[in-house]
Amino acid sequence: MISEVPEKTDIRKTQTLIAPYVHRTQVHTSVSLNSVAGSNMFFKCENFQKGGAFKYRGATNAIMALSREEAIRGVATHSSGNHAQALSLAAGTRGIKAYIVMPQNAPKIKVDAVRSYGGEITFCQPTLPDREATLLKVIEETGALEIHPYNDYRIIAGQATAAAELFEDVEELDCLIAPVGGGGLLSGCILSARYFSPNTKVYGAEPEKANDAWKSFRHKKLIPVDTALTIADGLRTSLGSRTFPIIIEGAADILCVTEEGIIKAMFMIWERMKLMVEPSAAVPLAAIMEHPSLFAGKRTGVILSGGNVDLHKILHYGQ
Amino acid sequence: MISEVPEKTDIRKTQTLIAPYVHRTQVHTSVSLNSVAGSNMFFKCENFQKGGAFKYRGATNAIMALSREEAIRGVATHSSGNHAQALSLAAGTRGIKAYIVMPQNAPKIKVDAVRSYGGEITFCQPTLPDREATLLKVIEETGALEIHPYNDYRIIAGQATAAAELFEDVEELDCLIAPVGGGGLLSGCILSARYFSPNTKVYGAEPEKANDAWKSFRHKKLIPVDTALTIADGLRTSLGSRTFPIIIEGAADILCVTEEGIIKAMFMIWERMKLMVEPSAAVPLAAIMEHPSLFAGKRTGVILSGGNVDLHKILHYGQ
């Protein structure tokens, strides 16, 4: 059980624990994108991860680390995104139940994905208070254990394994950049860099329209996002009490990007790298292109966080 | 110089000759697509090939096999598609000129791609007679050697290396399926299966709207396509005098697919495999889904032929 900021050994143990279940994802490069962005980039393809996103790492760690007594109670969360899918899939792998609270207006494609992975859905009103109240009720009725999408050290240690693998596969990275929503992935990157590649600077990339991490980092206190009308739907959440301290201590900076920059970067990854990534996953490349001086001539690791695109929405957006 | 149907040793030599220049592309699998299609599929990712398509294999073989005297004359072709890009890129790698005749209404994205690879473009009227007349003129003026996109044994031997690699990486394939336009790729697949995996049945997959290979196969004579209004822009051409005999002798069958089937298969590859493929590359999966009895429970190799999507066109089509 990881109940404090994960240590080096915690991350190594997590790697061993989850290795039989997660994909060791590939690292892709692109001569053409390097030339456009002026940086030597190494893309960690978490879009190829099971469930289509890095989230499966943390969810698997949280679930596989449960004792037998805990596990039989099942797990629960409220999420309309990749965490819901990841938790359902990981719970199914261990043969336990996943209770997912989703807003009743969640896209059908996401509802279907959670169901196809065996998650048991309870619908709620699309407001945070009702999501939380419904989750509490589900937990009360089922006895399931809540697995928070990011504000949990087991989740952070799981997400850290993406960067840990990247450091094993690509030497001497000057920088590493990851998108930041709730901060689970970025915290994990910071910890893995600290332990396994201390000369690597770690940046968070965030949409201007959901810039709570940027504000929190600048003001050195947790400032939640008000409204987050960004296309990068994975990054609309705010930092948590466990992710913020790791980020404020370890991030080189938080870089904001425009919506136009996100869409441009996403289409470049689609067209030039032939990789299907979701808008959130394109935010780091957008940041490299909008803040070029930080990355010029550097060896830069980039976490492509996921590939769960709602194509109908994007096709509409593309018009 | 390969001037007859390539033998086993020709394909092995081609593999060695082009190995320093081409990517040995990955093989991807998808539990979710296997379950939808009812077949155990192994996708050879030529969308990750240099230039974004398998065409680079044949173009590289044709160019690297030229004598020094031939090479300095440069190469020429008429094409508005992947062959133009592949030939420009391969010529640039050898440091020789590529003269490309393109119709003046060719999409800007393709014109830009050829230019970015160093190809020298001559525009012509968008008719086959004017394309051929303009190419002859360019050849007369420059002395360049014509490299046909598929009706050339050097090209066929080059394309054959994709299947040869797949047979090395995945054992005991019951079937192999590739899209068929001019037939260079399918001919290559047939030859590699004959030499390296004789128990594998090889199928060609073709849009109903460009069904010249299907007709030619059925009637045992070369019947060119009239008009080919398929979204699979790489498959609008007709078989050639060198590809047709290999196909009629070695293909298990030619399978036709609907336009709806192509689009559905393409979006499934995008959404579930997180791979950006062009419409032509989705034609084999469409064929597996529209002819399920042939592939049920079989180990099936699938050539994902390329990833050069004209996104603006597709986005428009998706509406």
Image (cartoon, coloured by chain):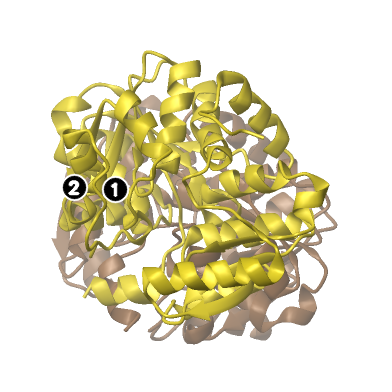
Chain colours: A brown, B yellow
> Looking at the picture, which amino acid does disc 2 mark?
Val
Q: Is residue B53 visible?
A: yes
**For residue B271, what is the image quadrant?**
bottom left
Left or right position of A124 against B147: left
Disc 2 target residue = B257
Q: Residue at x 48, y 25 (%)?
A: B192
Q: Element under label 2?
A: strand
> Which label number is shown at residue B283?
1
Q: Decide: is B84 above or below A226.
A: above
> Looking at the picture, which amino acid does disc 1 mark?
Val
Q: Quadrant of the C terminus of chain A?
A: bottom left
Residue A132 percent coordinates (x, y): 27, 65
Residue A159 percent coordinates (x, y): 55, 50
Closer to the chain start, of discs 2 and 1, is 2
Left or right position of A167 against B30: right
Query: Which of the chains bears the disc numbered 2?
Result: B
Q: Residue at x 41, y 86 (%)?
A: A226
Residue A185 percent coordinates (x, y): 56, 58
Q: Decide: is A272 above or below B18.
A: below
Q: Residue at x 34, y 74 (%)?
A: B313
**For residue A135, what is the image quadrant?**
bottom left
Left or right position of B17 against A230: right
Q: Residue furthest front?
A: B140
Q: Element under label 1?
A: helix
Q: How many marks?
A: 2
